[in-house]
Amino acid sequence: MMKEKVSISLSVDVLNRVDEAAKEENRKRSNYIDTVLRKHFKIEETHQKPFAKFSR
């Protein structure tokens, strides 16, 4: 999945709550915001990690 950098302005109190929630879930801020927005818009995760090649 392609990601695009954006710049947004958030109030300090909202940003503080985002940072606290992200820290509680051991996530980066961007990942937390992406996850919350995906849940809000009911967007399913579409990318999957490819299987590693297995060789012996």
Image (cartoon, helix red, strand yellow):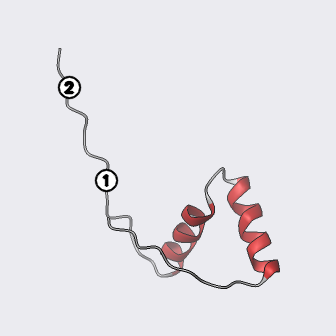
> Label 2 amino acid?
Phe
Q: Secondary structure at mark 1?
A: loop
Residue sitting at the far top: 56
User: Looking at the picture, does residue 49 appear above or below residue 19?
Assistant: above
Q: In 3D space, how far apart are the residues under numbered discs 2 and 1 (Cα atoms)? A: 18 Å
Q: Residue sitting at 31 percent across and 48 percent down?
A: 49
Quarter of image, res 52: top left
Q: Which residue is mark 1?
A: 48
Residue sitting at the far right: 13
Q: Residue sitting at 17 percent across and 14 percent down?
A: 56
Label located before the other in sequence (2 or 1) = 1
Give the position of the N terminus as an image quadrant: bottom left
> Label 1 amino acid?
Gln
User: Looking at the picture, does residue 10 appear above or below residue 25?
Assistant: below
Image coordinates for residue 41, horizontal then vertical, percent:
47, 82
Quarter of image, res 21: bottom right
Q: Are marks 2 and 1 in contact (CB under 8 Å)?
A: no
For residue 34, side relative to residue 55 (left or right): right
* Residue 54, disc: 2
